[in-house]
Image: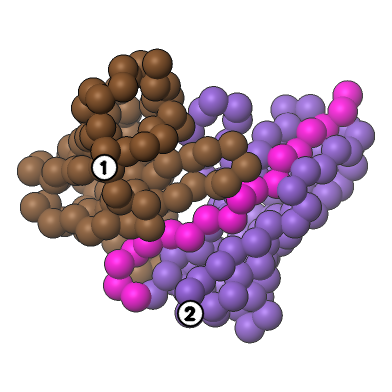
Chain colours: A brown, B purple
Amino acid sequence: DGGITQSPKYLFRKEGQNVTLSCEQNLNHDAMYWYRQDPGQGLRLIYYSQIVNDFQKGDIAEGYSVSREKKESFPLTVTSAQKNPTAFYLCASSSRTGSYNEQFFGPGTRLTVL
Amino acid sequence: KQEVTQIPAALSVPEGENLVLNCSFTDSAIYNLQWFRQDPGKGLTSLLLIQSSQREQTSGRLNASLDKSSGRSTLYIAASQPGDSATYLCAVCDTSGTYKYIFGTGTRLKVLA
């Protein structure tokens, strides 16, 4: 089955800890994205990558970091510099094919700060 | 800067009713517009994608239209069912070459049995 997997489903972080969220896709998509979703605020773009070894900041990149060493993987690290990390994190991918570009999402990771 | 708005924020209808969800965007330079469904605590499921050159797309009981000149899209759901209860989001893909999507905040739909 082709799709996007995210792990873990639930993650608990203590104050001052860095944590890494995993995102893997087997759709052979070039582009991958990380979003944060808070109640009533819709999806906000954290980072995105159009190709391996390249990524750009989105609208709310402060306190987050990413890497794109493989086409199928785009892990997100939530650092201790992120002041309010409790949220639902969604990973997505797309094929970068102009008007046919369709975005697909993983099941999400819910991060809670203890 | 592209902005996407969805009205209403929440909607409650009796089962069997036909309904329309609205999405508006400020910049008509888009590759496409995509409608998603999100169930509580889950990821987004793609429902329909309308390319910038298209006027509408249909899938089962769903029909989405696109009017780029007025910056509007509608999602029509025919004969609504309790299983349609979810949050519906629209997103536009910009043409800057970044393939970024800009999302609306969604319409939370409840279909009453």
- Disc 1 crowd, CA 10 A, few/some/many (<14, 14-19, 20+): many
Q: Is B41 situated above or below A31? A: above
* Amino acid type of the residue tagged 2 in the rendering: Ala
Task: Examine the image and state in which quarter residue B4 appears.
Answer: bottom right
> In the depicted view, which residue is nearer to us: A100 or B73?
B73
Q: Which residues are magenta?
A: B96-113
Name the residue located 48 percent from the left edge and 74 percent from the top edge. B1
Mark 2 and mark 1: Cα distance apart in space:
30 Å
Residue B100, image x and y in percent? 37, 62
Residue under label 1:
A64
Q: Chain of mark 1?
A: A
The label shown at residue A49 is: none
Q: Is B28 situated above or below B58? A: below
Which of discs 2 and 1 lies nearer the camera? The answer is 1
* Amino acid type of the residue tagged 1 in the rendering: Tyr
Residue B102, image x and y in percent? 48, 60
Residue under label 2:
B29
Name the residue located 62 percent from the left edge and 42 percent from the top edge. A40
- Disc 2 crowd, CA 10 A, few/some/many (<14, 14-19, 20+): some
